[in-house]
Amino acid sequence: MYTDILLPVDREHEASWKTALPVAIEYCRAFGAKLHVLTVVPGLGVGDVSSFLPMGYEQQLLDKANQWMHAFARDNVPSGIAVQHIVGHGKVHREILRVATEIGADLIVMASHRPELKDHLLGSNAANVVQHAKCSVLVVRARP
């Protein structure tokens, strides 16, 4: 049923993958799917902030994210699961949607926190992905 499963993870927040990863692994095993693990490095943009950073700083962030991604997969994805490491760059929900389209994902598995008022007003990454994804999205919540 599923062949390409995308799992977005936030390197700074274990909660972004702690509950979603086991579900994604279970689905990969059940369907023989490939797991595409994505982390996103936020863009620094141009202007005031980026002008104070050393030349090549963004590339260093991307390289570190790539190293982290390989270690994450090695430590957390069981052997026997085909895995692709992807490092995105920019706004989180946009990168998730872009990568999902690019790899032909037929399922996105992602964690979501309990929504707060600000999420209803501004929208969370999970809400944006659910609203705009062209494939199925499974939002996994931690048990209270």
Image (cartoon, helix red, strand yellow):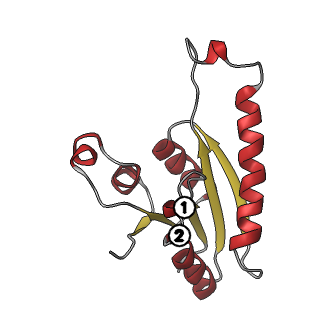
Residue that carries the numbered disc 2 in the rendered image: 18
Q: CA distance from mark 2 to mark 1?
A: 6 Å
Q: Residue furthest front?
A: 144
* Residue 90 shown left or right of residue 54 in the figure: left
Quadrant of the frame with the C terminus: bottom left
Task: Please give the label number shown on residue 97.
Answer: none
Q: Nearer the viewer, residue 58 or 99?
A: 58
Instruction: Kindly state the secondary structure of the residue where label 1 is placed.
Output: helix
Q: Give the image location of residue 107, x and y in percent.
A: 50, 68
The answer to which image quadrant residue 89 occupies is top right
Task: Say above or below: 114 vs 124.
Answer: below
Instruction: Kindly state the secondary structure of the residue where label 2 is placed.
Output: loop
Residues at discs 2 and 1 in contact (Cβ within 8 Å): yes
Q: Give the image location of residue 74, x and y in percent.
A: 77, 69
Q: Nearer the viewer, residue 13 or 108?
A: 13
Q: Residue at x 55, y 12 (%)?
A: 48
Q: Residue at x 39, y 72 (%)?
A: 142
Residue that carries the numbered disc 1 in the rendered image: 14
Q: Residue at x 58, y 31 (%)?
A: 43
Task: Say above or below: 77 vs 116.
Answer: below
Estimate how packed mark 1 is, as few (under 14), some (14 to 19) or many (20 or more) residues with alpha carbons within 10 Å: few
Estimate how packed mark 2 is, as few (under 14), some (14 to 19) or many (20 or more) residues with alpha carbons within 10 Å: some
Q: Give the image location of residue 94, x and y in percent.
A: 48, 42
Counting labels gives: 2
What is the three-letter code of the residue carrying label 2? Answer: Lys
What is the three-letter code of the residue carrying label 1? Answer: Glu
